[in-house]
Amino acid sequence: MSAPSSPVVRAGAVGLARASAAAGALPALVAAAVVVLLTAAVAVPGWLAPADPLGIDPASAFSAPGPGHVFGTDESGRDVYTRIVHGARDSLTIGVAATGVGLGLALLLGVPAGLTAGRRGRRVHPAWIDASISRVLEVLFALPGLLLALVFIAFAGPGVTTTVVAVGLSTAPGYARIIRAQVVRLRDAEMVQAARVLGRSRTRILLRHLLPNALGPVAVLATLGVGQAVVWASALSFLGLGAPPPAPEWGAMLSAGRTYLTVAWWMTVFPGLAIVLVAASATVLGRWLQRRAEGIAA
């Protein structure tokens, strides 16, 4: 028979657990600080970089990073730091808007599929709706996300709006499958059954019980999706299919800087670091939220 643990041992175990939790939360705090900084760059870029991101100064072209220009200048003498700060609005707006488009399309596909999965009717077989939507999702899944975006842009033409829709379309299938699975799980839950017994309408049950609970896990994953959307939008701009020059969009800055990579490395490195920082911060914050959600659910 083992001896009971002493108060000292229990206190040590509790302290170790708290230290481990604090260490696990540290990356999330850093990621949250980065998100706050990026939000400031989107909302009030002039506070962080008061100069004109489009103002040219040929005499200062290709200036290396230094006191006057912390990130150097490009081929037209424009300050790279200023362009990165002001470009946060374009890059992050595209990423967030594309995620919103993906979630909207996912709702249109995932909710009807989840409500009709396995259902049988007298005249019409509702499961056909689920089967049709599932086949559409499988076709979309067969194409890599970036390739699907390129196919859409090939038909609709390049531009910022087209990039938002293209990236949103490429992310929608993943969200739609998760929403479908959540709706299938919740449609026969006790709270839904109770609402039906109380005479609640189908619309009220859908809006007050199904959708809020089905969108919880998707909202956490959408945090991860913003980082991915920013990377894809930057990739499309790098290919010349996104924001047109001289817009200070990070992908377009990467594309412009690759020509001068051997003589002005800072034109490519710093916009690339900004993209990596956004993607990494969104991933760390999203995974932390996911662990928190799973811990609360458990």
Image (cartoon, rainbow, N blue to C red):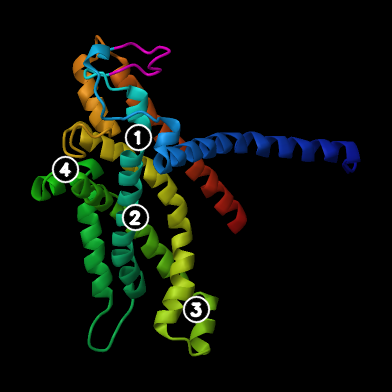
- Give the mark nearest the N terminus, 2 or 4: 2
- Give the mark nearest the N terminus, 1 or 3: 1
Q: Judge left or right: residue 139 versus residue 203.
A: left
Of the two numbered discs 3 and 4 in the rendering, the one whose residue sits closer to the viewer? 4
Picture quarter with the C terminus? bottom right
Report the front residue among 152 and 293.
152
- The CA distance from mark 3 to mark 4 is 42 Å
Determine crowd level at label 2: few under 14, some 14-19, many 20+ residues with C-alpha closer than 10 A: many
- The CA distance from mark 2 to mark 3 is 27 Å
Residue 150 badge: 4
Contact flag, marks 4 and 1 (Cβ < 8 Å): no
Residue 292 badge: none
- The CA distance from mark 2 to mark 4 is 19 Å
Q: Is residue 67 located in the magenta-colored stretch of the structure?
A: yes
- The CA distance from mark 4 to mark 1 is 26 Å
Contact flag, marks 2 and 4 (Cβ < 8 Å): no
Disc 3 residue type (three-letter)? Val
- Give the mark nearest the N terminus, 4 or 1: 1
Residue 100 badge: 2
Residue 86 badge: 1
Q: Residue at x 28, y 60 (%)?
A: 105
Look at the image and tell me whether residue 26 can be seen: yes
Secondary structure beneath dot 2 equals helix
Q: Position of residue 194 (x, y in %)?
A: 54, 83
Q: Judge left or right: residue 100 versus residue 27.
A: left
- The CA distance from mark 1 to mark 3 is 47 Å
Disc 1 residue type (three-letter)? His
